Amino acid sequence: MQARHGFPREPAARVASGGALFGCDDGRVSTTNVILIIVAALVVLAVLVGTGILLARRRRVSLAQQEREDTSAGRGGYRAGSGISLSSGGTTGAPEHPVEERTDTQGQPGVGDDAAVPRDSQRRGMVDVPLPSSSEADDTTVGTDDTATTTGEPPAAESATAPTVPEQQPPAESEPVPETDTPAPRDEDSESTATAASGGATGTVPPESPERPEDSQAGAEPGTAAETEVEVEPIEPSTGRLERLRGRLARSQSMFGQSVLGLLGAGDLDEDSWEEIEDTLLMADLGATTASEIIERLRTEVAARGVRTPEQARALLREVLVDALATTQSRAVQALPHGDPADGGKPAVALVVGVNGTGKTTTTGKLARVLVADGRTVLLGAADTFRAAAVEQLGTWGERVGAEVVRGDEGADPASVAFESVQRGADSGVDAILVDTAGRLHTKTGLMDELGKVKRVIGKRAQVDEVLLVLDATTGQNGLAQARVFADVVDVTGIVLTKLDGTAKGGIVFQVQRELGVPVKLVGLGEGADDLAPFEPEAFVDALLG
Ligand SMILES: Nc1nc2c(ncn2[C@@H]2O[C@H](COP(=O)(O)OP(=O)(O)OP(=O)(O)O)[C@@H](O)[C@H]2O)c(=O)[nH]1
């Protein structure tokens, strides 16, 4: 083909021949090249646009997925099916105790004088309980401020009608409770209890106790809840409770969901902003160590991921907070029996411990409701003999769920009541025995004496499967200090953090779990009978982020 000036008359033919593209005169080559460059540019542009669309689509898919994840996590509520999980004892190993990670290892605060004073302790006062206890007190000398109308009492309930452990004599702790692997005849058991737990004179409640008040159940024989026809009031299933109670975390939510997220989502954070975020985390009671670790991780991830939008910031914060709450230990409450109690199996035994006023009795009652709602039979042991009203209060909870309550007089030896509870629960074949204890002790030694004795004495008859430490979230660092003392005294297997509904310091959850090395299993979100929810990190963080 010959080169010509201008555009070829038959471009198709020329292109087909191949010569027009690379040879020929300058003008023609230049025009062709221009066309080629334009075509190439268009191709490159098309590739770029295509890639861009693809990336944009991918991001959309990712965001949609994130949105789905957020939704499925309830955006603040527990996923369907995440009720309070229960398990038999012995399924979890010894709790990790990362003492070295404590933010404050200075000194070992005592319980009572040296430690925090719970909100309501003023009206109740702090009185040392000598161990072994004396039996000077009787029901008629109950202080006027310790009446059955205490705020923790479930509303609209009848007064307690549980059997009462008769007046007790000072127990001689040195005398061990005889080992009784298999239940002996009832009377012998009672005798052995009396001998061992209280120096030979501890009163016990025989199953046929005639002391059950007349106003209990008409015509009902005293005995276990399983045997007694009681009208159990409706109990809300534990499933989805945080979903329902999510608004109760409003105060903590404003710390995390608004303050932290607001700062983080603004993008391009300077040092001041990071400091402000850290301050907010500290104010929410996450503790110095946890707060600085979280800040460090956030800074790294913000840079690495190029977090720009509020949605990205939320997703990142959620991930980091959930990771900070992770534990390898089970959060199931070990309150299921070992085998079938009706067929020789043994009931689960749970001790509820904590400083006075933290919500022990309330939590014990709420937990009993969870168990009963799960179809279990429960016996409650009112070993908080320090305050008569606490005993009455537990009795009321028991009434409401048809659970028998074993109790002693005010000032009675808690260990003997605890032992009797376990004895009686085993004999009557309940699924779970929940023992409420007292926390009013001035010194760590006193606490150790009392709780140690309670545990030891129970151990003569049954295995303690769960020791739930109840902490009042509103007391912040002081509550934590007390928790350390308890953790040193007894092997705490789970934390119940109460009154989260009344505090902006929901971050205490992070610190408590980290410093005690014990999982938070339950959270109290109100004074209502069913305001106890299972603790589940994802759902909890979602609730905090709003
Ligand atoms: N707002 C709120 N109040 C709670 C919660 N749990 C318990 N309470 C209240 O805290 C107060 C003390 O509860 P109790 O169960 O009596 O505490 P305790 O530890 O048994 O106290 P003592 O018997 O004196 O040792 C009561 O008014 C309860 O209603 C909770 O999760 N939220």
Image (tube, helix red, strand yellow):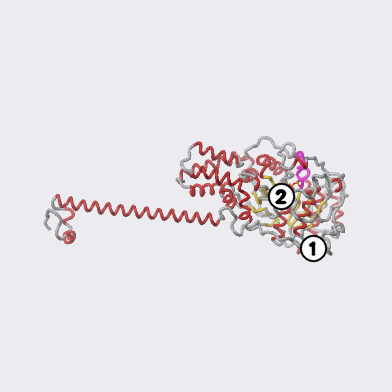
Q: Which of the 4 image quarters holds residue 101?
A: top right
Image quarter where the N terminus lies is bottom left
The span shown in magenta is: 437-452
Q: Nearer the viewer, mark 1 or mark 2?
A: 1
Secondary element at tag 2: strand
**Residue 338 location in percent, x, y?**
72, 59
Disc 2 residue type (three-letter): Val
**Residue 64 location in percent, x, y?**
47, 56
**Residue 373 location in percent, x, y?**
70, 60
Instruction: Tell me, for residue 228, which label it has, or none.
Output: 1
**Residue 382 in view here:** yes
Disc 1 residue type (three-letter): Thr
**Residue 232 location in percent, x, y?**
74, 61
Q: Nearer the viewer, residue 524 or 431?
A: 524
Horizontal side of 341 relative to 543 (left or right) equals: right
Q: Which residue is mark 2?
A: 467
> Is 443 inside the magenta-drawn segment?
yes
- Mark 1, residues whose alpha carbon is within 10 Å: few (<14), some, or many (≥20)? some
Residue reaching furthest front? 156
